Amino acid sequence: MRERIEKALDKVRPMLAADGGNVELVDVTEDGVVKLKLKGSCGCCPMSSMTLKNGIERILKQEVPEIKEVIAL
């Protein structure tokens, strides 16, 4: 599953990079929780929680339906 998540994140990264940010996959739990670290300008952006939930989480769940939740560390 980790490889599929990385592949899905590769679809998201160009959008984040356009704003000077990136995302790093930190962990995937057995119960389907994906832990990410937002980097660059995304790490301190006040809109990062919306980007995480409405953008990254939505795309990851479409690509990897076993994902239950995406959280930022």
Image (cartoon, grey):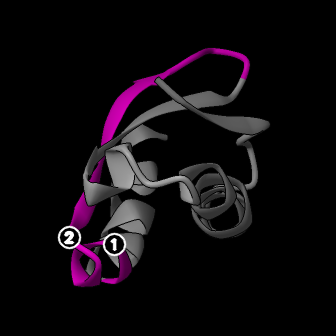
Element type at mark 1: helix
Residue 39 in percent (x, y) is at: 25, 46
Amino acid type at image mark 2: Gly
> Between 23 and 47, which is closer to the camera in this rendering?
47
Q: Position of residue 66 (x, y in %)?
A: 74, 43
Q: Would you say the residues marked 2 and 1 are in contact, meaning their CB atoms lie under 8 Å apart?
A: no
Task: Judge from the rendering whether residue 24 lies leftward or rightward of residue 37; answer left or right.
Answer: left
Residue 62 on image: x %, y %:
71, 69
Residue labelled with disc 2 = 20
What is the number of the mark on residue 16?
A: 1
Indicate which label's residue lies in the foreground, 2 or 1.
2
Q: Which residues are magenta?
A: 15-31
- Above or below: residue 73 compared with residue 30: below
Q: Residue at x 45, y 51 (%)?
A: 5
Counting every numbered tag in the picture gives 2
How much space separates mark 2 and mark 1, taking CA atoms? 6 Å
**Residue 49 position (above or below residue 25):** below
Q: Is residue 18 magenta?
A: yes
* Residue 4 vertical position relative to residue 44 in the rendered view, above or below: below
Q: Residue 53, which numbered label?
A: none
Q: Label 2: few (<14), some or many (≥20) within 10 Å? A: few
> Which residue is at the far top?
30
Q: Residue at x 71, y 55 (%)?
A: 53
Task: Specify few, some or many for label 1: CA neighbours under 10 Å numbering under 14, 14-19, or 20 or more.
Answer: some
Q: Where residue 67 sits: x, y (%)?
A: 71, 42
Q: Quadrant of residue 15?
A: bottom left
In the rendered structure, the answer to whether residue 43 lies left or right of residue 46 reads left
Which picture quadrant has residue 69? top right
